[in-house]
Amino acid sequence: MRHFLKSVVTMTAVCAIASVPVLLKTESASADEGMRGSYVGIGVSADGSGAAASVTGRIDLKPVSIRTTVTGACDSGLCATLVVPTVTYDFGIGKNANIYAGLGASAISLSDSNSSVSLGTGAVVQAGAEGAISQNVVLYGDGTYFTNGGGTLWKVGVGYKF
């Protein structure tokens, strides 16, 4: 129960931080606001046990996006790979910025030079923010809560928008 409450507080904090730009916004919302376009990016994912490189992609289906993150690490010939696909609803908060929230799944596997084994799947809840800093460059960050007790994965990165 304590772990569950800690995770709920974590996701609440992510949502609150992602909502700050909306609260500070002074002009009225219009239909053309928000960041349009799909992207592929590289970044860093971190949880309570460490950090690893990650690859993230977004397919823009405005106002919904399909996102996937792949991250993993190897140690002494044993490699772990985590795949997290999500469907998010995007809220435009400016000309080139969105906050988003959504649901998805996770799958993790372990492998060595001889075999691979799946450790299971689970549901996730995700919230984050993204913004274009130029025509083709995006900065993004989010928190993903694993409902099966796997904790929270934090991610930041830079992407190429197309």
Image: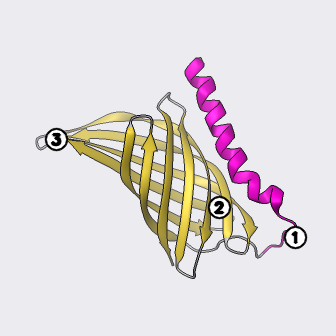
Label 1 to label 3, Cα distance in Å? 54 Å
Q: How is the image coloured?
A: secondary structure
Residue range highlighted in magenta:
2-31
Instruction: Please name whichever residue, 33 or 46, is drawn nearer the observer in this view of the structure.
Output: 46
Secondary structure of residue under mark 1: loop
Question: Where does residue 96 sit, x and y in percent of width and height?
Answer: 67, 73
User: Residue at coordinates 63% horizontally, 39% vertically from top-left?
Assistant: 11
| Mark whose residue sits in front, 2 or 1 | 1
Looking at the rendered structure, the kind of residue marked 1 is Glu
Which residue is disc 1 drawn over?
27
Instruction: Please name whichever residue, 85 or 10, is drawn nearer the observer in this view of the structure.
Output: 10
Question: Where does residue 18 sit, x and y in percent of width and height?
Answer: 68, 52
Which residue is disc 2 drawn over?
64
Taking 32 as reference, is 138 left or right? left
Label 3 to label 2, Cα distance in Å? 37 Å
Around disc 3, counting alpha carbons within 10 Å, would you say few (fewer than 14), some (14 to 19), or many (20 or more)?
A: some
Label 2 to label 1, Cα distance in Å? 23 Å
Q: How many marks?
A: 3
Looking at the rendered structure, the kind of residue marked 2 is Val
Which residue is disc 3 drawn over?
112
User: Residue at coordinates 64% horizontally, 44% vertically from top-left?
Assistant: 14
